[in-house]
Amino acid sequence: MKVSNGEWRERLIDKMPADLAKEIDIFETEITLKKQGKIDDKIFAETRLRRGAYGQRYDNGHRHDGKTERVLDFPAAGLTKGPNTMWDAPGMLRIKVPFGGMNADRLEVMADLAEEYSDGIGHVTTRQDFQLHYIHIEDTPDIMRRLAVVGMTSREACGNSVRNVTACPLAGVCRTQSFDVTGYADALMKFLLGHPDTMEFGRKFKPAFSGCRDEACGLVKMHDIGYVAVTREVDGKTERGFEVYIGGGLGAVPYQAKVLYDFMPVEEMLPVAQAVSRVYGRLGEKKNRQHARIKFLIKKLGLDEFKRLVEEERKILPYDERWTGLLVDVDRFEEDALKPAGVVQLSATLPEGYRAWFQTNVYKQRQAGYNVVTVTLPLGDITATQLRKLADIARQYVKETVRTTVEQNIVLRWVSDDDLIAVYNELKSVKLHAAGAGTVVDLVSCPGTDTCKLGISASRGLAAELRTRKLAQYDTLDPAIRNLRIKVSGCFNSCGQHHVADLGFYGVSRNKDGYTVPHFQVILGGQWSENAGSYGLALGAVPSKNIPTVVDRITERYLADREEDESFQKFTQRIGKATLKTLFEDLVPIPSHDDAPEFYTDWGDAREYTIGDMGVGECAGEVVSPAEFALTAADREVFEAQLLLDKGDYAESVRRAFDAMLRGATGLLHQIRVAAGKDSASIVSAFRTHFFDTEVFFDPFRGGSIAQYFFDANEGVASADSASQETAHQRVEEAQLFLEGCQSCYTRLITQPLVAAPTK
């Protein structure tokens, strides 16, 4: 029941840890002071972000459940449409769920909060968090208090902080694990939460744990720091440890983590994490946010030097009793069953849909007679009613052993064989029985333009459309297609993890006759297994409304040409990206607005597509400007750079990627009628003068710093002959992002003509 502000404080004051209660009181006071204008906007922004409170986009108001479009009724929800500030428009609260651990009480609290403060829906993220959207900032202290009572917090869920510590949702019951990593993930979360040595980070820091190397559940290779459980024999005894990875991350330019230690004893986990934090906090970038992640620091220093600094820091750390104290009872997270083990029932009288569900949503635990049941949540959404039902099931059939997953689902662990049919029927009663977990219909998507301010295209809308189409085909799909993974991001920041999908997409935009058109870049070559073993690259941008056809064509070619049990990733490598790109080249051209107005709207949104406040320009005939030619040529060159990368010609790939950037910059200079000359030094100098120094090249989604990729590439091309595969891969990514910035800048230039800066 929603009560007046302040009443929850009195009700719950004795049910919360004293330090957490005080912290929430302080935040409540800060909100009051901010409303009175006594706290600077910049300071308060970081304050609320560190407590998990985000501003959000509100002008769409759409929620997609994978089948239908759910439009938020703003008046009914008590919301107002107006300037998107934290005061007169709703925001979002992110709630950390370390290692995904939930229980019945937590599920019920989430249900209550979703109903009373949000739109009745909880959202599971790709970092095992919960999010509540359309939250008013004044309500967040009471929400935090109610979360604290069940051991949950939003503290440091956002901002320049240590984010949620993720872990394999099968930890402890996995058939291939070295040991259960749950307790270690919990210890790291408690140790780093609010730690003084993590307060000086220039950007976020994401840890992850995996119980084994080969599966995907932990995805440690795409994290800032990742731990893979390993063991070794010492004097006849089995010793636990971790293979430690450092410097991974997706984002706009993805980096694969590097091995910092082949074997680190578990006792060293916390002090080494502290030493890493100190080095990162001291030496990490602070001014340029786009280069502030730890992956950039390691690139700058080199892995060996970074490791040396960490080990020097480790030597001088003052002893902290928590290094071992937090690990004393690490095995307390070991679980057992509520019900006796049974026998799987597969008779002819099974409920409708059960066989398909059993095949995809039931995982046999390492403990005989028990199972992990995946509850598939379309696009990560779950209603308050469904949350309460899950709480009931968790109490009735298991010992409340529930976890969220990075694929935006929920799992129930320790379900007895005897209870599988009963659990299926219980889930079916609230429409949580969908089959297809971990298949092509189990799409992952970030919020995109539904609620994210950085969203360029409607990732949830596209994901819902693809899911609907694949569900309609599901019974007839070849198993090779069923097992593909599709991931969608609303922009290039990869919150939807498009880089590690079989088929990945991220939102971009293009201009046609003065209109802005939603597009998605097509990503192929990603690897989900082996803890995110490799990253895909973009093949080209396609109008959003043509993406389902792209999916069909690529998958049909895979079926037609695959060799025996060839994986999709190996197929794409063998066929080659040049061939695959020809499959959708005819889908790239944008039809005119008069001929196909539907191309000028995004999935799930009937309004004409725009980015921000950009207006719709007048059509100036069919004349193609030199800038458009240059940008088109630049797209071609960056694709050729990718082909060279695939062939192993890393030096030429780096050079070609830089050439693509030069073409993009030249196109913009043409648009403002600046003749820069043909040599690279002149082009770079003119671009800096007319676009960077003047802040005209200011991408609304990443800021002017995206131009730094161009300047870095200019400096790095001289050493192209010694380029590694990783360097070339990153340069291609950076070139793609720079060209997206050129496209955005060009769109602004044709609607808001610019006079060239005066020559010095």
Image: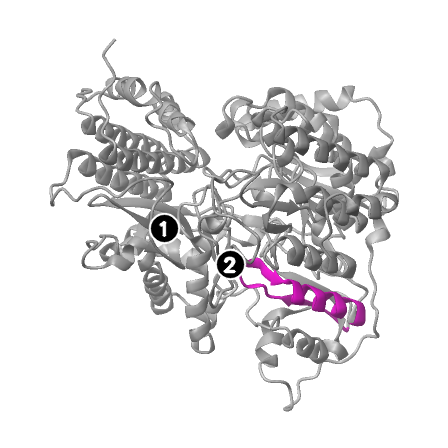
For residue 30, side relative to residue 541 (left or right): right
- Callout 1 touching callout 2 (CB < 8 Å): no
Circle 1 sits on which residue? 520
Residue 62 seen from this side: yes
Instruction: Name the residue type under label 2.
Output: Asp
Q: Residue 73 carries which label?
A: 2
Instruction: Name the residue type under label 1.
Output: Phe
Locate residue 567, reporting x and y percent: 46, 61
For residue 171, side relative to residue 63 (left or right): right
Q: Quarter of the image containing the C terminus? A: top left
Judged by depth in the image, the label closer to the viewer, 1 or 2, is 2
Q: Residue 369 carries which label?
A: none
Q: Residue at image x 73%, y 54%? A: 101
Up the image or down, 532 lies above or below 419; here it is above
Q: Nearer the viewer, residue 182 or 624?
A: 624
Start and end of the magenta stretch?
A: 369-396
Helix, strand or loop for disc 2: loop
**Could you tell which of marks 1 and 2 lies nearer the N-terminus?**
2
Corner quadrant of residue 708: top left
Residue 269 seen from this side: no
For residue 271, side relative to residue 80 (left or right): right
Up the image or down, 302 lies above or below 383; here it is above
Q: Which colour scheme is used?
A: one colour
Q: Residue at image x 62%, y 54%? A: 217
Q: Residue at image x 23%, y 11%? A: 759
Corner quadrant of residue 586: bottom left
Query: Does the magenta segment cover residue 394?
Result: yes
Q: Quarter of the image containing the N terminus? A: bottom right
